[in-house]
Image (tube, rainbow, N blue to C red):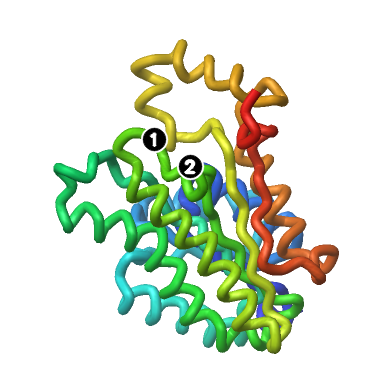
Amino acid sequence: MSKNKGKIAVVTGATGGIGFSVAKRLGQDGYTVVINGIEDAEGAKRISELTAVGIDAEYIGFDVTSEEAVTTNIKAIGEKYGKIDVLVNNAGGLGGRSRFEEMTTDFYRFVMALNLDSVFFASRAAIPFLKKGEHPSIINYTSNAGWTAGGPGAGIYGTSKAGVHAITRALAKDLAEYGIRANAVSPGTIDTDFHKQIKSTKPEVFASWANNIMLGRLGQPEDVAGVISFLASKDASFITAETIQIGGGQALGI
C-alpha cells in the first residue's frame, strides 16, 4: 500500500512525554505518523524508536509559535501525503510562572503563542488537507487550568488553555459541514517531564498528588494516548466539540 492511501497523523510536540506516546499509539493503529519538535537530535532518536517497532514515521523540526514555520511545514506534509487524517495539537506547556504585576508582555505573548496561537496556525494550515482525509479530526489539549485559571503564577497558562477549549468548539462548528470533527482532551496530573523539577526537588510533594485523585494514582502518557486513539477513530465519528477529562476524577476533588 502506498503512503498516499494510508492514514496520516500529524502530532506536534511529540519528541517526548505524552506526545511521543500518542504518536506511538497512532502508529500502532496503522497511521503513518509525522512528529514535530524543536530538538532535532531527540526527533531523530524518536523516529528510530518508532521505525524499530514497524511504525512508518518521520520527524519535521519547526517551532509551533512561528506562523510562517507552521504554515510552510503543515502544507508540505499535506502535499507530500495528499491529505491529513488527524492533527493532534499536542505542543504546549506552562512556559514558566509569573504573577500579573511582574508579568512582561513578552512572557504573556510567549505562553499564549505556545498554547493557543499554535493550535490556530496548525489547524488553519491543515484544514485543506483534512478535507481530503478519512474520518478527519483535530484533537487539542486543554487543562483543568482552563476552568480554575491555574495556580499561583500560572494565570496566563490557564487563560491560554481556556482559549483552547473555546477554539476547539469553534473549530467544530466551523468544520462540521466538511465532516471534520474537533475535540479536546484535558489531562490531569500525568507522570512526565512536565513535572520533572518538582519530582526531583520535592519528591514527597509529587507523590502526594495522587492523594487528590479519586483513582489514587497519577496518570501515564498511555492513558492519554488511548483516549486520543479513540477520538481519532471511526468509533468516535459522531463526537465533536467535546472535551474529555483524563484525570482519574481529579477535577471533582475528593
Q: Residue furthest right?
A: 235
Observer-nearest residue: 65 or 174? 174
Give, as a three-letter code, the residue at label 1: Gly
Where is residue 146 shown, x and y percent of the image?
A: 48, 50
Q: Secondary structure at mark 1?
A: loop
Residue in the picture at 37% in, 48% down: 157
The quarter of the rendered structure image containing the C terminus is: top right
Where is residue 215 shown, x and y percent of the image?
A: 72, 25
Residue in the picture at 28% in, 39% down: 97
Q: Where does label 2 land, which residue?
A: 148
Observer-nearest residue: 147 or 95? 147
Labelled disc at residue 127: none
User: Distance of mark 1 from mark 2, alpha carbons?
Assistant: 8 Å
CB-based contact (under 8 Å), mark 1 and mark 2: yes
CA neighbours of label 1 inside 10 A, class few (<14), some (14 to 19), many (20+): few
70 sits to left or right of 230? left
Query: Can residue 57 be seen here?
Result: no
Give, as a three-letter code, the residue at label 2: Thr
The quarter of the rendered structure image containing the N terminus is: bottom right
Residue 18's place in the image compared with 64, above or below, is: above
83 sits to left or right of 155? right
Determine the image quadrant of residue 232.
bottom right
241 sits to left or right of 108? right
Residue in the picture at 73% in, 83% down: 179
Residue in the picture at 53% in, 80% down: 126
Q: Where does label 1 land, which residue?
A: 151
Where is residue 212 shown, x and y percent of the image?
A: 59, 22
16 sits to left or right of 66? right
